[in-house]
Image: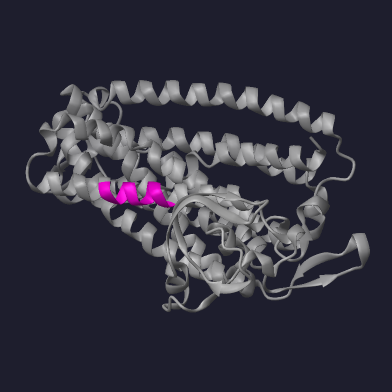
């Protein structure tokens, strides 16, 4: 394999591993706000225990996200220096904003969230929880903006000539609100909330199956189902909006999504199939005639730009994009069915006794992760052969002095290190889930509510006014 392909595989591997954790921390953030808010409102110790337990899980996913994310950014210099030279002024500003405005906000207040239970008042601690949750979302905002600029560049001009040409920002707000940023952001965030909700449902269902921490599990499960039902529908709606944007701004990607080759003809929507790129046909497929045209134009007879409108060297790898896109949709629809099925059985009072369905909820935690990875894969492969759409080819973005041997060595090392890191994550996560909230039941309550107000309990057990 050549150095370009190896560098792409390495970056894909590291970002795919990293992307396991931010959706979980973003999704869990809103649960922490909900749970601690309920604790402050109702004064029930159950909600304190729920918040404390999920804070531990949140802190673990946050730490793993930081550890895996740092390595990813170094590759902009080691493997993609030509890309960094071209987009440094644009991409660098968004990454800097993410670090200054989001990461430090999130990590700074995380210390209060994790260690401040007996050291600050309830309102201060709740504020820290809100700011950590907001910081995780704000971090995603800047990362999605940076990536969306690669898909739909705006607010820039080109300076220099030949190999020294690069993009410079001319309008920061056009960069922020580039044609695809807000649509993609809404889709990403709803996917994160769904990932967090399925983790909460999975752990809660496991406890119910094992008949452990039953009161805790029932309360957590209800919250998880409510968020999952809303987030799964948001995924469907925001996915449609995002696809409309792709139709307008990246027609080659949309054509690859459905294996649509005719240069200008009504487009069909496939439920499944296999794209034979040599014959430019979808084989073994089941399709709905004109449905792609209807989704894009609300008219099944309207033409959709096909792949034959583009030179072969400007087309993405069609079958890989087709398969990843359709698998993502299948998983998304399955998550809607599972979420609303759980809500229905809960409403009917049957859910807690349905072990087969509870096991389905336990295993469902894998589905949003798979959908997130497949969505990222279809979006990034669909942009190929461009690192920056219609501006910089991926083959021109790699570091000129990098050798294939160096790329092989670093890829193997990343695989080994990340395998150990993932094993550590699974071990720690399993340990925290098996321990559950049991270790929290004997802890001194953070706050004691009295008629006179709120009193804190310092570490020595003596009361003191907050």
| Closest to the observer, 284 or 320 | 284
Which residue is depicted at the point 36% across and 37% down?
365
Which portion, as a residue range, is magenta? Answer: 329-337
Side (left or right) of 192 relative to 450: right
- Image-based side of 60 in relation to 33, left or right: right
Q: Identify the image quadrant of the N terminus.
A: top right
Residue 333 magenta: yes
- Total number of numbered discs in the rendering: 0
Give the colour scheme shown.
Answer: one colour
Percent x, y for residue 154?
Answer: 67, 72
Question: Which residue is at a point 63% across and 74% down the rendered structure image?
Answer: 174
Answer with the quarter of the image where residue 163 lies: bottom right
Q: Nearer the viewer, residue 268 or 346?
A: 268
Q: Quadrant of the C terminus?
A: top left
Does residue 151 appear left or right of residue 240 in this picture?
right
Which secondary structure class fits the magenta region best?
helix
Depth order, front residue of 144/66: 144
Instruction: Pinpoint residue 250: horizontal percent, then vertical percent.
Output: 61, 67
185 in magenta: no
Left or right of 430, for residue 407: right
Can you tell which quarter of the image residue 121 is in?
A: top left
- Say whether residue 443 is visible: no
**Against 249, is 379 above or below?**
above
Q: Position of residue 96 (x, y in %)?
A: 65, 55
Residue 99 location (% of width, % of height)? 60, 51
Relative vertical location of residue 250 with respect to residue 211 in this rendering, above or below = below
Which residue lies at the image location 17% right of the left edge and 29% below the top edge? 355
Residue at the image position 24 percent from the left and 34 percent from the top: 204
């Amino acid at each position: 394999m050549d150095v370009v392909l190896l560098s792409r595989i390495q970056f894909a591997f590291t970002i795919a591993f990293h992307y396991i954790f931010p959706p979980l921390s973003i999704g869990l953030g809103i649960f922490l706000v909900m749970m601690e808010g309920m604790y402050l409102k109702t004064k029930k110790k159950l909600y304190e225990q729920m918040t404390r337990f999920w804070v531990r899980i949140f802190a673990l996913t946050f730490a793993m996200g930081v550890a895996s994310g740092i390595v990813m950014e170094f590759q902009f210099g080691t493997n993609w220096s030509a890309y960094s030279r071209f987009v440094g002024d644009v991409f660098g500003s968004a990454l800097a904003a993410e670090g200054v405005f989001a990461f430090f906000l999130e990590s700074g207040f995380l210390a209060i969230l994790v260690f401040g239970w007996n050291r600050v008042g309830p309102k201060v601690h709740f504020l820290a929880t809100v700011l950590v949750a907001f910081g995780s979302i704000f971090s995603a905002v800047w990362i999605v903006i940076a990536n969306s600029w690669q898909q739909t560049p705006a607010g820039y001009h080109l300076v220099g000539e030949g190999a020294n040409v690069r993009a410079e920002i001319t309008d920061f707000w056009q960069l922020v609100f580039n044609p695809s940023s807000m649509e993609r952001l809404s889709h990403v965030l709803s996917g994160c909330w769904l990932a967090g909700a399925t983790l909460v449902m999975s752990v809660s269902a496991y406890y119910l199956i094992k008949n452990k921490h039953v009161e805790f599990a029932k309360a957590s499960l209800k919250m998880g189902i409510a968020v999952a039902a809303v987030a799964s529908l948001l995924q469907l709606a925001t996915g449609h909006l995002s696809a409309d944007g792709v139709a307008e701004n990246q027609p080659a990607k949309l054509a690859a999504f459905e294996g649509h080759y005719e240069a200008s003809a009504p487009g069909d929507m496939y439920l499944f199939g296999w794209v034979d790129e040599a014959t430019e046909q979808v084989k073994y497929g089941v399709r709905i005639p004109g449905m792609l045209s209807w989704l894009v134009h609300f008219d099944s007879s309207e033409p959709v730009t096909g792949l034959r409108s583009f030179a072969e060297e400007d087309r993405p790898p069609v079958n890989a994009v087709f398969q990843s896109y359709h698998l993502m949709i299948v998983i998304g629809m399955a998550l809607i069915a599972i979420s609303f099925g759980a809500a229905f059985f809960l409403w009917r009072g049957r859910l807690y006794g349905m072990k087969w369905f509870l096991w389905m909820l336990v295993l469902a935690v894998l589905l949003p992760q798979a959908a997130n990875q497949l969505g990222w894969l279809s979006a990034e492969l669909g942009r190929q052969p461009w690192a920056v759409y219609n501006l910089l080819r991926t083959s021109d973005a790699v570091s000129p002095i990098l050798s294939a041997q160096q790329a092989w060595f670093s890829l193997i090392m990343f695989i080994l290190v990340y395998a150990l890191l993932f094993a550590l994550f699974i071990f720690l996560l399993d340990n925290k889930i098996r321990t559950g909230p049991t270790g929290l039941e004997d802890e001194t309550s953070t706050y004691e509510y009295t008629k006179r107000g709120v009193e804190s309990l310092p570490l020595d057990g003596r009361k003191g006014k907050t």
